[in-house]
Image (cartoon, grey):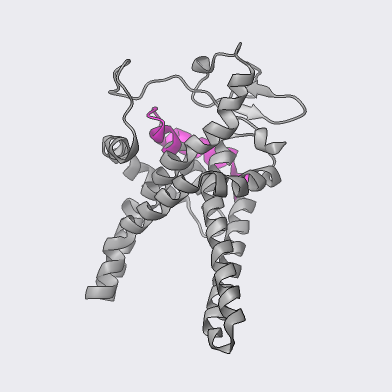
Amino acid sequence: MAFLGFGKGYAKEGPGVKKNAPQKRGFIRFFEIYFRKFGGIIKANLMFVLFSLPVVTAGASWAALTFVMREYAKEQHSFIFSDFWEHFRKNWKQAFPAGLAGLAISLITGFSLYFYWLNSGLGTYMYILLGLSLMIGVIFLFASYYVYLMIITLDLKLGAIFKNAMIFSIAGLKQNVFVILGTALALAVPLGLMYFYDISIGILVLLLLYALLLPATLCFLICFNCYPVIEKYCIDPYYEAHPEEDRRGRGTDTDTLFSDEFVIKDSKGNRL
């Protein structure tokens, strides 16, 4: 089963983290890491904006940004420019169709919601279809949190990645809700300015946040909350089934090949 695919083990301690210090949980740890890595988050965001051409390279740029933010969420070091460029090139073949699929689903869902809301006066069944469209849209939104994380973590076919992502949209429901709430908070200021003050000021603030901080912040939020779900269902079971393997000895970019047998490889394709 593709759902049993597995990923990487890591051992490096994050900078400034004491060896035996207890790991903090929840939003306290989130903000501690976020502000500690704040300069790197801005740099990664600028890289994303620079490389992200609509449709053509947006998916690959998001995959590259996801790798850097995943390392930050795991409190590990990332060489921003080299890591970003490496994973932009490395994951383009999967990230490009994933981006197209995400765009198509967003357009179809958006049109469905608009159509059923516009025609809601025609009868109760329109409200039912509106509710179903909204539910499907939320499920696909939750699934999208995991697609690029799996692209840069697991060596699986795109179909298996989509299948797993749909499973994680339910299995990681609590984490997915946290991402939604965090996204709402991140957008509260510019959207509030648009609604309560001046729409042009709100748009200006939103564009400024997008250029400097917003994509990387949302990506870090996704990685921080959703990567543990992948770890729980994909990575941990592998090491439990293979206790002879020392996950602490894995590097920060160890890829996993999913095939008839599980073969762990390093980033150059060599068996470990």
Q: Residue at x 70, y 31 (%)?
A: 258
The quarter in which the C terminus is drawn is: top right
The quarter in which the N terminus is drawn is: top right
Please determine whether, in this image, residue 194 is positioned above or below residue 187. below
46 in the magenta segment = no
Q: Residue at x 66, y 33 (%)?
A: 4
85 in the magenta segment = yes
Please determine whether, in this image, residue 4 is positioned above or below residue 190. above
Which is nearer the eye, 80 or 8?
Answer: 8
Q: Which residues are magenta?
A: 69-95
Which is nearer the eye, 99 or 195?
Answer: 195
Q: In the rendering, at what x and y percent does residue 100 appear? A: 61, 58
Please determine whether, in this image, residue 229 is positioned above or below residue 182. above
Q: Residue furthest left?
A: 197
Can residue 93 be seen from the camera position used here?
A: no
**Position of 256 compared to 83: left or right?**
right
Q: Quadrant of the rendered structure where residue 155 is?
A: top right
Most common secondary structure along the magenta stretch = helix
Which is nearer the eye, 72 or 244?
Answer: 244
